[in-house]
Image: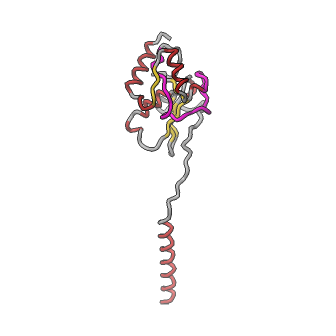
Amino acid sequence: MRNAFLDTSRTLLVLLFGLFLAACGEPVEQKQNLGPVAFHSSDECHVCGMIITDFPGPKGEAVDGASVKKFCSAAEMLGWWLQPENRIGAARLYVHDMGRGEWLKPDDSHLIDATKAFYVVDLGDSGLKGAMGAVIASFGDQQAAKKLAAIHGARVLRFGEMNQDVLQQAAGMQHMSPH
């Protein structure tokens, strides 16, 4: 009886030691795809709930390990991102490169890192339509952004220069536009 107890105790001790060693190993990291995701006809804007593909112009999205938040415009995504509570986590932001797509139907194969994009703001008199609020054009190439800005008397800003004041001013210009 005593031998059976000792054998069982040794077996349990070896199993516990093995579990302890396994727990001390390197953590297994799961690779998560944080790349851009295509827009679909049923996608709703994370902010306003409207159908995203019903609007022309560049769209935006925030991709993290748990979800993809899609927006009906680059301006909506920027406005959402500028809220302090949304800067938590490791979300990657993407916008359409309008230098490589049509305004009426941006090409999802040309979604670019929003933090590296060039933004054309103050497009109120341009006639370019978008979702509610500010119409902002996003570009991967600075020269393409400058070209559109020069045509419409607009400005080119970088991601770090975008703030709520810029978005509100752009939205105000859109409402004053005769188009």
- Is residue 44 shown left or right of residue 170? right
Residue at position x 41%, y 42% from top?
88
Q: Position of residue 77 (x, y in %)?
A: 47, 31
Residue at position x 56%, y 22% from top?
56
Residue situated in front as seen by the camera: 158 or 162: 158
Q: Is residue 8 above or below residue 94?
A: below
Residue at position x 58%, y 37% from top?
37
Residue situated in front as seen by the camera: 177 or 49: 177
Whether 106 is among the magenta residues is yes
Report if residue 172 is visible in the image: yes
Q: How is the image coloured?
A: secondary structure
Whether 115 is among the magenta residues is yes
User: How many numbered markers are drawn?
Assistant: 0
Q: Which residues are magenta?
A: 100-124
- Is residue 66 shown left or right of residue 172? right
Residue situated in front as seen by the camera: 26 or 160: 160
- Give the image quarter of residue 157: top left
Q: Is residue 138 above or below residue 154?
A: below
Outermost residue on the top side: it is 178
Q: Position of residue 97 (x, y in %)?
A: 56, 29
Residue situated in front as seen by the camera: 3 or 91: 91
Outermost residue on the front side: it is 143
Q: Position of residue 128 (x, y in %)?
A: 53, 17
Report if residue 51 is visible in the image: no
Residue at position x 56%, y 38% from top?
36
